[in-house]
Each structure stands twice: as C-alpha cells, then as structure tokens.
Image (cartoon, helix red, strand yellow):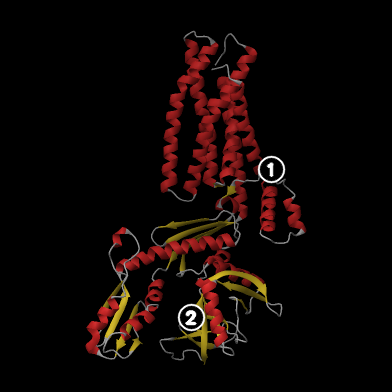
Amino acid sequence: MLQFPLWKTLLVWAVVLVGCLFAAPNLVYDRVERANDARTAIAAGAAATPAQAADAAGWPDWLPSGLVNLGLDLRGGVYLLVEVAVEDVYADRTQAMWPELRDALRAVPGIASVRRIEGPADELRVRIDNPEALPAALTAARALAQPVTSALLAAGADNIEVTGGGEGVVVLRLSEAERRASDERTVAQSLEIIRRRVDEAGTREPSIQRQGAQRIVVQVPGVGSADELMAIIGQTAKLSFHPVIRAAGPGEPVGLDELLLPEADREGFLVLERAAVVGGDDLVDSQASFDQNGQPAVSFRFDAVGARKFGDYTRDNIGKLFAIVLDDTVISAPQIQSHIAGGSGIITGRFTVEEATNLSILLRAGALPAEIRVLEQRTVGPELGRDSIEAGRLASLVAFGAVLVFMVLTYGLFGLFGSIALLCNIILIFAVMSVIGATLTLPGIAGVVLTIGMAVDANVLIYERIREELRTAKGVSRAIELGFDRALTSITDANVTTLIACVIMYWIGSGPVRGFAVTLAIGVLTSVFTAIFVTRVLIAAWFARTRPKSITL
C-alpha cells in the first residue's frame, strides 16, 4: 500500500490542483462576477462600454470563471410567496366557446337565432328563439365536448357540462374534471412564465419553485425591493388588438359582444369589439425602442399566423382606429394609416425608458394566464448578507483552526497530514460547487462548517486502526497498511448513511434545507476522497523518505 505508483500519486495531486484552479475565482469574487456580467452583455450583442471592456479584461477568459452562487440570505434580495388565481381562467375558457356554440346551435333545425344572455362569469348562457328545439340544442351543444387531457384520474371525462337553464336557455360550463386539469395547466404555465420573465430581467440564480397546489415561491437575489420584483412578474401582460367602435363615458352600457375599457394616456373610455383581431399569443419578439419623435416605445413582431391576420385587417380598415389593449387598458388607439405588412409594428404611449424595457420583457416572456396574489413577501438587505458571509467565514476559520490544533495535539505529524487533507477537502467543495453552479446559502455555510468537523472522522478512524495494529507488534509499514484497509468499511458505512440523509433532505425539503443538503453531500464525497487518497499519498511520501522503525500515535 505504501509503495504508491507514480501515476496514482500524480492523479491525486492533479485532482487537487484542478480543484484549486476552479475554486480560485471565488477568492476574487467581485472581479470575476463583473467580468462574467460584462462578457454576457457583450455576447448579447450590446456595444461594449469602456467600463464593460475594463471589467471583461479584469479576469482572463482562458481561466475558469465559475463562481459559487450566493443565495438570497447572503446576497440580499426578495422572497415572494404568491398564489395563482386559477379561477380567473374558467370565465375566459367558457366565454371563448361562444362562436363555436353559436354556430352549432344555428345548425339545429328549427332554430333561427341564438343570442347570449347575462349569467355568472364562469358560465356561457344563450337563449334560442324556439324553446321546443331545446332538447336538440342540448344534444348539439354536448357534441362539442372533448375528452379531458390531464391526469389519469380524469381519464374519460368530458371537458364541458351542458344543461338547460330555463325556457329556451342553454347553459355551458367547464366540468369539474376540466377545472382540475385547467388548474394544473394554469399553475404550470404561470411557473414557466415567471421563470422566463425573471431570466429575461437578468437576475442571478433565481429560485422559482411550486409549493402546494396553487402557490409559487420566488426567491431572487440582487433585487432591491418586492415592488421591483412584482413589476416584473406581477403584471399579467395580456396583450390584444381590437377594433374601436366608438368613444364612450364611464359606466356606459355596452352589449355582450363589446368591451368598455379606459384609455391609459387620457381620461376617456372606448367601446371595442370583444373579439380580438390578434392577441399576444401570436407575438414572437418585442424590444424597447423609440418612436419617430424620439419617445420610448415598444416594437413587436408577430408569427406567420398573426402577421397574416394583422396585415389583412390593416389592409381592409384604413382610416379606422385600432386599439392596443394591455391588461384591460387601452394603452394606444392609433388610426390605421396604411396596410401594415410583415407582421411588425410599434406600441407608443407615455412610457419611460424603464417602462418600455419592462413591457418588452413581459411581452417577450408571454402573458400570465391568471392573476397572481402575493401572500408573503420578505426583503433581505445586502448589508445583512455581507454580515452573514463574514460570520460564516469567521466560523469556518475557527472550526478549521480548532480541528487543526486537536489533530496535531492528538496524532502529531499524522494529524498535520489529516489537516492538509482537510484543507484540500474545503478547496474541492468550492470547486465542485463552482462547476455545477450550486447556490450557497447561510445553512449551506453551516453545511461547510459541519463538513470541516466531520471530514477528519475518516482520518480518526484510520489513525485509531493504525494504533491498534501497532499494539500487536506489527511493523510500521504493515500497521499503516492494515489501518487504512480495515477502516475503509467503517468510513464507507458512516458516509453512505450521511448521503442518504442528504438525499432525503433535498427530496422533501426546499430552499435553505436543500442548500444545506447539497453542500453537506458534496463535502461528504470530497472528504472521503481526501481522507483515503490525499492522506495516503502524504503518508506514503513521508514513509518512503524517512523509513521510520517506529512511530508514536
């Protein structure tokens, strides 16, 4: 065992050296972070400013530049717990079936006209002119049902329920199975859209996770306030383009096929056709820009289907007003001057540069399917994060120093070898976390400190086994060899059980608990490597040089 082949020795030290290389950027965290940000901005196509060019040159691009990401409690930022208003989707889904239901009922013999009537928002109520044809009308409406596309528990169920609501009245609503399926899709879609919006805003390492049936936890380091974060994720950003019927006053009654919406840029209201010509679902890109007067605006571009609908309408309605509606407010209602081909245009309004940038981000990420309500919010200041980092650094240094003193006093030179292996272990922990992009939280620092205390357990087991073998009057070389071999089983058992605990914590935990589990699991794996291999290489090199006849442990 102590005759270590050269290639094994070189391999062990190569792993340690690579670990040092990948962990080194964390020693100059701010400089590397600025360099990474500058390179990302330049790669995105933006013209490099002198400051960005200087930041990019601050760290060589041929060196590793991965960093351990700092969590919310260390960098500062915002924590939000939001709830998705899944019931908002029921009304939109139901009302959207009006054209299909109208055409199906008009095709029934004996029915000449069909009109919508008032009813609950999540129901579509229509009245036919011939009450005697109601059974045939119900049959025709039920034929519109489709199987629910969702979980196995809803297999075979229809997506709508159709009943008679009185004399000549047909009532259509979503089935219970479809509502559950809709809830699942709405929350999943909201989660993905929130993630895209936060990513578009350029925040670092956000944590966005589902919690329960209808809730989402959003943790974004580096954001100054909850209001700033809600400006990005809270707006539904539902964009649509509607024909303008007339100007109106507040509270003026309108038909069921019309909308009365306020104008954002002046105190007025417009009556619009309820059916949109084209919607935000057809958008493929949006960017902050400036109009012909140099005022901030938002340019947009439709996909092929949206471009065709947009172009056909502008070609056939030159001279008419065309309203751009964002979240039930008319942000602009320009007059169509000419045919707009190509599917691109510009949204003008009383925007600031920041508002135009945020709106372009929202449109590019997509509209939230439902409103989100804030249930809990917390803001962590960067000063508190810096204090936590300093406290964690101090705790780590004290823990390492205490372990070093104990090992040297207890095991002498072998204790020093164990302490060197412990230092290599800490370096490898940060190297692995930097490579995989793991996030370090305050509980994660606790995991590192705990790893420092646990890492020497393997060395203690090895040294105690060597002591036992020395008592049996075996030679030094044989005692050391048996000490390593016979301690291996105990080391493996102890660390496997710890890894199982880490897996369970990561699986059922969230946020800080997961951060603790990740750092502890990485520390367990690296400590086994350093205790078995780094310590062994050090002892083998010392033994080959000194050839002692006896040792004291």
| Residue 237 visible in rendering | no
Residue at 75% x, 60% y is 49
Residue at 54% x, 72% y is 304
Which of the labelled discs sits on residue 63, or is there none? 1
| Residue 457 visible in rendering | yes
Which of the labelled discs sits on residue 551, or is there none? none
Quarter that holds the C terminus: top right
Residue 59: where, in percent of width, then height?
Answer: 72, 46
Q: Label 2's element?
A: loop
Residue 152: where, in percent of width, then height?
Answer: 31, 58
**Quarter where residue 504 is shown:** top left
Image: 259 above or below 507: below
Residue type, numbered disc 2:
Ala
Residue at 58% x, 43% y is 435
Q: Label 1's element?
A: loop
Location of mark 2 (residue): 276
Image: 528 above or below 542: below
Q: In the image as oriented, which residue stretches furthest toward the right? A: 50
